Amino acid sequence: MSTALIILAAGKGTRMKSDQAKVLHQIAAAPMLVHAMRAGQALEPDATVVVVGHDGEAVASAAKAHDPGVQIARQTKQRGTAHAVAQAAPALADHAGDAIVLYGDTPFISQDTLLRMAEARKSHDVVVLGFNAADPGRYGRLVMNGDTLERITEFKDADEATRAITFCNSGVVAASTKHLFDLIDAVGNDNASGEYYLTDIVEIAREKGLGATAIACDESETMGINSRAELALAEAAFQANARARALDDGVTLPAPDSVHFAFDTVIGRDAIIEQNVVFGPGVTVESGARIRAFSHLEGCHVSRGATVGPYARLRPGTELAEDTRIGNFVEVKNAIIDEGAKVNHLSYIGDAHLGEATNVGAGTITCNYDGVMKHHTEVGRNAFIGSNTMLVAPVSVGDDAMTASGSVITRNVPDGALAIARAAQENKPGFARKLFEMLKKKKLKRDERAG
């Protein structure tokens, strides 16, 4: 059975107190909308429709950046959740499978939960996701009779007996695409808010002789985010879960609470991640690698046996081969570092390729930008780059070649050659004492004028 995702992302989120749409605020370096989209991928959907409203162009852009095939529907007026879902109907007019409604501000619905909903759909026309709330508060209550969902009752409409129910509505619902839109067409807005509520489809389904049920998930999965405080709580929840998974997978975290993961961080077993490491998006660290304290990684791949840091930064496009070494206060960007190569201290390697077993001395910089364009630096195998070398790209240094410390390399260095590119040193006997005396007299006169 094919599946369509309908993700509601039209709300402004006034409690966020932001000019940006609520669903674009980030958790673990990704918009919360992307978390909802990623969860839905467990169902292998053949169509995804994101319903946008406030800041719609930015929301649509974020959705398409994650999934270029996503379709965009627009809710120009906020008239309730059923009205929002209805905006996806034209995009799914020919869809013959199931549809599931998710929310861009509820990012933690698990893939396992969605798969269980899909399984329940095989025997029920409508499936609603519920949770047993520790504090039901003002959530809508799911009124069950055995495994049959009889109705969803909003708190304000519930009597005392119904309010005592702790099984609450998450808002996530699954049905055949045809049934879903037929039911929504029958939803009215005869209520205090004058809005069209998705929850009404359960009673309408029962009136039409359709079967409805609800399945339960952990309450933590249904966390909705409406304020900065809740965003911070969501970030903390994500990080706690990510750290626990890493430890269970065999990753060593000496101080797990200080490590911050991105939504897509991948780390192999027996890797060691030291204190205060931050992962941005797009990082893979292979088994047995070591990321030392206070390093920041994004958009990079670290192979087995490599060591990074402390205080290192790996930027997008960095590829570290096995047994490489990136040391303290080194920044690498868009560069391939071959097996056994070392950049140990205080260096910048950008738009470059370092060959196998090459050693880069402290203070080396690949001067890759001319103010308009970026240029490439190529360094061969077993080369030695002396400390404080400026490699002015485009330039190459051959296999087994060497640059003298303090050199500014502007021409290609052949294999096996030593390049020296610095001014000749000249010593002037006694001149330092004279210069100091001159400077001290100058300072004394300045102080006297100031006094």
Image: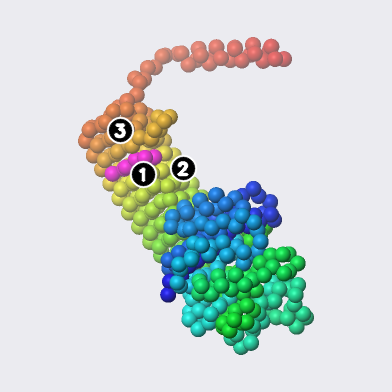
| Residue 126 is at least partly visible in this image | yes
Residue at image location 59% in from the left, 12% down from the top: 442
Residue at image location 45% in from the left, 72% down from the top: 96
Residue position marked by numbered label 2 in the rendering: 329
Element at label 3: strand
How far apart are the alpha carbons under marks 1 and 2? Answer: 16 Å
Element at label 2: loop
x and y, in percent, of residue 369 in the image: 40, 33
The residue range painted magenta reads 350-355
Q: Nearest the camera: 80 or 398?
A: 80
Indicate the quadrant containing the N terminus: top left, top right, bottom left or bottom right: bottom left
| Residue 218 is at least partly visible in this image | no
How far apart are the alpha carbons under marks 3 and 2? Answer: 24 Å
x and y, in percent, of residue 202 in the image: 62, 77
Residue position marked by numbered label 1 in the rendering: 335
- Check residue 129 for magenta coloring: no
